[in-house]
Image (tube, rainbow, N blue to C red):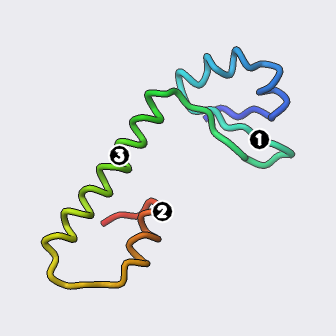
Amino acid sequence: MKALSANEAKTQFGNLLLNAQREPVQINKNGKAVAVMMSMDDYQGMESLKLKLLQDRAEKAKVDTNTVDGTPFFQDLASGKHD
């Protein structure tokens, strides 16, 4: 993944948009990663995968007769972990 400083992102915004269409671009501020710019297709794909994971887990929960505390489920979901 390419990386740019926040200042480079600001001064080269046109190029940033072009590069983000090909691959995600990391934006750093004071040497620390603070954001990622990606294409709308990549973003929508990522959101679709997150929704699919949530739907799969909901379906699994419907057929699972064992009840559990929901906190770990939502923590795993938020962190991106899955079975």
Q: Nearer the viewer, residue 70 or 41?
A: 70
Which residue position is annotated with label 2? 78
Q: Find residue 66 and name its label.
A: none
- Mark 1 element type: strand
Mark closer to the observer (3, 1)? 3
Q: Find residue 28 and name its label.
A: 1
* Residue type at tag 3: Leu
Q: Nearer the viewer, residue 3 or 11?
A: 11
Mark closer to the observer (1, 2)? 2
Q: Nearer the viewer, residue 72 or 15?
A: 72
Badge 1 density bin: few <14, some 14–19, many ≥20, Cα 10 Å: some
Q: Which residue is drawn at the image coordinates 60% and 35% (left, top)?
A: 1
**Which one is earlier in the sequence, the residue at label 2 or at label 3?**
3
Question: Residue 6 appears in which quarter of the rendering?
Answer: top right
Q: Distance between the residues labelled 2 and 3?
A: 13 Å
Which residue position is annotated with label 3? 49
Q: Which residue is drawn at the image coordinates 43% and 27% (left, top)?
A: 41
Q: In which quadrant is the C terminus drawn?
A: bottom left
Badge 3 density bin: few <14, some 14–19, many ≥20, Cα 10 Å: few
- Mark 3 element type: helix
**Which one is earlier in the sequence, the residue at label 1 or at label 2?**
1
Pinpoint residue 25: horizontal percent, then vertical percent.
63, 32
Badge 2 density bin: few <14, some 14–19, many ≥20, Cα 10 Å: few
Question: Residue 19 appears in which quarter of the rendering?
Answer: top right
* Residue type at tag 1: Asn
- Is the Cβ of the residue at disc 1 closer than 8 Å to that at disc 2? no
- Is the Cβ of the residue at disc 2 closer than 8 Å to that at disc 3? no
Q: Is residue 10 left or right of residue 68?
A: right
**Which one is earlier in the sequence, the residue at label 3 or at label 1?**
1
Pinpoint residue 13: horizontal percent, then vertical percent.
74, 20
Pinpoint residue 54: horizontal percent, then vertical percent.
32, 57
* Residue type at tag 2: Ala
